[in-house]
Image (spheres, helix red, strand yellow):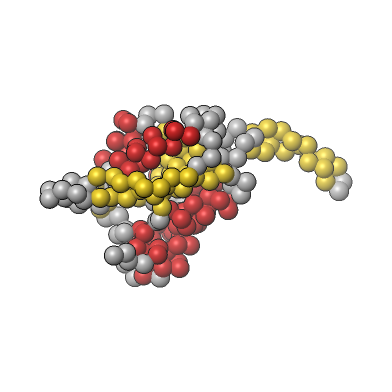
Amino acid sequence: MFVFADHPSIADQFIAELRDVTIQKDSMRFRRNLERLGELMAYEISKSMLFQMVKVQTPLGVAPTPLIKHPPVLATILRASLPFHQGFLNYFDRAENAFIGAYRGYPSVNEEFEVAMDYISSPDLSGKTVILMDPMLATGRSLEKVYHALLRFGTPARTHIAAVLASPEGVRYVQEKMPQCHLWLGAVDERLDSHYYIVPGLGDAGDLAFGEKI
């Protein structure tokens, strides 16, 4: 598991602006900060990928250069992840893409939510590197359901999970249920509240990025 907050960098500035109750009101800046964090995470994750040496012809000679052997598949949970996804796509610009519609449903009176999933589109994942992203890793249940749904499209060689903020409970859940996945997190916050939101967190990432839903 790699946590950006454990290694002070410009990422802390972007996360702070996502959290700040005044700055986050600017939805364009909020989306841009999610995009920036996607770019930083793409850079870090790239270090763990397979490379091959390629001879690049320059005007003055040949430069041996390590290049990523196979681009990853970027898998995104709609809708809050879209700017985050764009950051990854800015760097992995030859990546294939998967999109999943998953959200919390509250069918019972006790507020215990279930994960609803009504859309999925994916390329063949067999033997590929998959980066599954969601800005908020709260309980981990959505990620688990999405991950197993993606397996219908083939078994990846390696799966990375990227999130901007996570709860300790969500981290433990993912590590227990999906031990084969590698976690990349902006920061791990204190806890979940009674409604399963991350505290101190940043609020509803989807609403802040794209407006309140009804």
Q: Is residue 61 left or right of residue 137?
A: right
Q: Is residue 100 left or right of residue 174?
A: right
Hey, which residue is sitting farthest front in the picture?
118
Q: Residue at x 40, y 56 (%)?
A: 80
Residue 139 percent location from the top left of the image: 28, 43
Using the image as rendered, state which of residue 160 and residue 46 is in the foreground: 160
Quarter location, residue 146: top left
The part of the image, by quadrant, that contains residue 205 is bottom left
Residue 65 in view (yes/no)? yes
Please tell me which residue lies in front, 155 or 3.
155
| Percent of width and height locating residue 95 | 58, 44
Q: For this view, does 111 lie left or right of residue 53?
A: left
Please name the residue shown 60% across and 40% down the image.
71
Q: Quadrant of residue 173?
A: top left
Q: Quick one: quadrant of the N terminus?
A: top left
Residue placed farthest to the right in the image?
60
User: Is any atom of residue 189 visible in this view?
Assistant: no
Q: Is residue 180 above or below residue 136?
A: above
Q: Nearer the viewer, residue 171 or 61?
A: 171
The quadrant in which the C terminus is found is bottom left
Residue at 50% x, 38% y: name it. 130
| Residue 67 image offset from top left, x and y in percent | 67, 38
